[in-house]
Amino acid sequence: MDKRRKKKRDEGSSSNLTWQEKKDIADKEEKSLLNEIQALRAWVGMVGAMNDEQLKEYLKNRPQDLKTSKIQKKKPPPNRDQKVSQENSISLSCLPPSFISALLVYPFSCSV
């Protein structure tokens, strides 16, 4: 309910402004955006003119607000193939010795 009231207040206050006041607000916003663009262009020019050593030094000493946070990688999920192969494997201890010797003499391969 509060959001609706707030919207109505915002709409009401903007409708009370004359076109000249709205234009002044837009001009101020435009001027601040142009200043930001100019500052960014100056920064790009400064960084572009640096050599590798200067860039390394800049990265080490750059302001805290420009530093990026390290993103930690997720741990890979446990390898499920190993679990499956262990579950499906046959224990040779439960097989008769004659069968085991036959396996050793005549190995087979499972091809699908």
Image (tube, grey):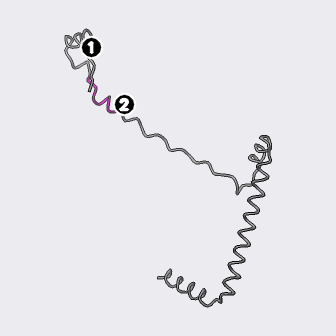
Does the magenta-highlighted stretch encompass residue 99? no
Q: Position of residue 17 (x, y in %)?
A: 64, 89
Q: Main secondary structure of the magenta part?
A: helix
Q: Which mark is residue 82?
A: 2
**Nearer to us in this view, 23 or 46:** 23
90 sits left or right of 24 in the view? left
At a point 53% along the width and 44% down the height, the residue shown is: 73
Residue 9 vs 69, above or below: the answer is below
Q: Position of residue 84 (x, y in %)?
A: 32, 32
At a point 73% along the width and 59% down the height, the residue shown is: 40
Q: Measure how far apart labels 1 and 2 are at the Cα level.
A: 22 Å
Q: Position of residue 107 (x, y in %)?
A: 27, 13
Q: Which residues are magenta?
A: 83-90
Residue 92 vs 25, above or below: the answer is above
Q: Which amino acid, mark 1? A: Pro
At a point 50% along the width and 80% down the height, the residue shown is: 3
Give the mark nearer the N terminus: 1 vs 2.
2
**Decide: marks 1, 2 in contact (CB < 8 A)?**
no
24 sits left or right of 98 in the view? right
Q: Which amino acid, mark 2? A: Gln
**Foreground tag (1 vs 2):** 1
Residue 64 vs 57, above or below: the answer is below
**Nearer to us in this view, 68 or 32:** 32
Q: Which mark is residue 107?
A: 1
**Nearer to us in this view, 96 or 29:** 29
